[in-house]
Amino acid sequence: MTPRHFHRLGATAMALALSVTAVHAEDIAEYMDFFEPLPYLPPIPANNSLTPEKIELGKMLFFEPRISGSGVISCATCHNPALGWSDRIPTAVGHDGQVGNRNTPTVLNSGFLGSQFWDGREPDLEGQALGPIEAEIEMNMDLEAAIRRLKEFDIYHEHFAAAFPGEDDPIRAENIAFAIASFERTLNTPNSPLDRFLAGDVQAMSDSQVEGMKLFVDAGCVACHNGPALTDSGFHRFELPGSTDEGRFIVTGDEADMFAFRTPTLRNVAVTYPYFNNGSVDNLHDAVQLMGQQMLGQDFSDEELDNLVAFMHALTGEMPDLEIPALP
């Protein structure tokens, strides 16, 4: 066969492939409409503009252990960049080795959430930022003591002045929260296989992942796991065997909120195990089956589980590319 024939054969094969791809895309278009690609940045609050100076200061504070009572725990202790910005243990370990009663949520894409913490007790990242510093079981540091410690270093005076220009005394609690929240809003993971698939790259997901996506919609998972972060940020009753955690009821006192927890994001769920509010399930197959049983009233077959888990892996995006700061 001559090179000319090879060329003609290649063109025919390409045309056939494009035809098959077009049919495939048309077949799944209705499912794609249920999903949204992750934007580059989440919404920015009007009272905390996102600036390079705030982001840099927030990064330093995120990794700064000296704003903890022991001087060895930082935000990054539980939100470790190497571990999906979580800690991969069932429940967090904090000051003096104390073990908490809830699993550490990842900080990735947290700016897209409608509230913070499993029980939604804070509405935004600014409200969330200071809680772990003061919590006795976490960082165990009085805010005034943390501020005094930061003021011991000239470099923090310089960074706070740059991040909050015009303020006479910028090293204060509100600005610590503003800076940490600003940094956290940059910890996003775009360009996952799902994002690329939604953008038109129909080969970005495997056949199994596409089947998982379709089942995710057909089974009703998408009712709660929707939007760019694949969470409705709502609260739903979810009881785990042996757990006595009363969930959002502790915040509201409303009996309707008993054992209700915020819907977690499914972005990067394959790398942010273990799962659920008490970290009691360490693998996606069991986690997905349990969700099906409790929230949908159905048992998935082995093949269905394999496809759903494959789809979960398609939600892992590009991790933030950052250099760990050199602290004073």
Image: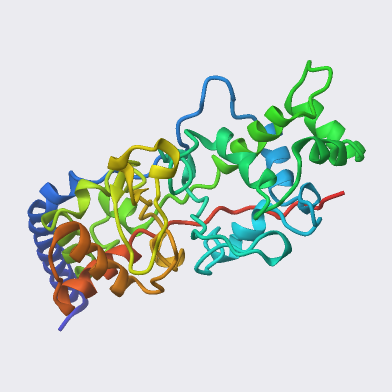
Residue 171, compared with residue 210, is above or below; it is: above
Where residue 320 sits: x, y (%)? Answer: 55, 53
The scheme the figure's colours follow is rainbow
Quarter of the figure with residue 324: bottom right
- 328 relative position to 220: left or right: right
Name the residue at 92% across, 37% down: 154
Where residue 179 sits: x, y (%)? Answer: 67, 35
Name the residue at 13% across, 58% down: 219
Residue furthest to the bottom in view is 1
Q: Nearer the viewer, residue 287 or 194?
A: 287
Q: Quadrant of the N terminus?
A: bottom left
- 60 relative position to 110: left or right: right
Residue 203, compared with residue 69, is above or below; it is: below
Name the residue at 18% across, 76% down: 6
Quarter of the figure with residue 210: bottom left
Where residue 141 sits: x, y (%)? Answer: 75, 46
Residue 60, compared with residue 243, is above or below; it is: above
Quarter of the figure with residue 303: bottom left
Residue 206 can be seen in this image: no
Where residue 261 sits: x, y (%)? Answer: 36, 49
Q: Count every numbered label the image shows and give the total.
A: 0
- 308 relative position to 15: left or right: right
Q: Nearer the viewer, residue 64 or 38?
A: 64
Residue 210 can be seen in this image: yes
Name the residue at 25% across, 47% down: 224
Q: Nearer the viewer, residue 144 or 18?
A: 144
